[in-house]
Amino acid sequence: MIIISKIELQGTDSLKFTDVGYTEDPAVAIKINENYDVTFGKFCAENRTKLYIGEASVSTFFATTDYVNEARTEVDTVEGLNIPEITNVNEL
């Protein structure tokens, strides 16, 4: 199972990660991560040095995007997490 996390801006320069669901379908995880890679992942890669030295902020990305999802954490069980199974990325 793969946990799906919502990533959003918290405050002016911090990120908040919230587990919003899980999937057992690798295709769903791949689609979520492809979207992450071409949006926030691309922003971070293009601005890595500027982010590190404080010349850029993640708030710049989130000024036009409310949140992104990521599906990278693999677990054996989601018992006790109270998160739904996501079978279609449109459910997010």
Image: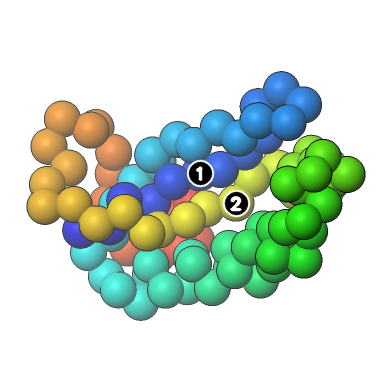
Which is nearer the N-term, disc 1 or disc 2?
1
Quadrant in the rendering for residue 87? bottom left
Q: Position of residue 44 (x, y in %)?
A: 70, 58
Please tell me how crowded label 1 is: few (under 14), some (14-19), or many (20+) other residues with Cα within 10 Å: some
Pointer 2 residue: 68
Asked which secondary structure carries label 2, the reply is: strand
Q: Residue at x 11, y 52 (%)?
A: 76
* Extreme residue toward the top, this view: 11
Q: Residue at x 77, y 26 (%)?
A: 12
Q: Quadrant of the N terminus?
A: bottom left
Residue 16 horizontal side relative to residue 52, left or right? left
Q: Residue at x 77, y 66 (%)?
A: 46
Count of all numbered marks drawn on residues in the image: 2
Pointer 1 residue: 6
Instruction: Tell me how the rendering is colored.
Output: rainbow
Residue 61 horizontal side relative to residue 91, left or right? right
Residue 30 horizontal side relative to residue 13, left or right? left
> Of the residues shown, which amino acid type is indicated by label 1?
Lys
Q: Is residue 60 visible to us here?
A: no
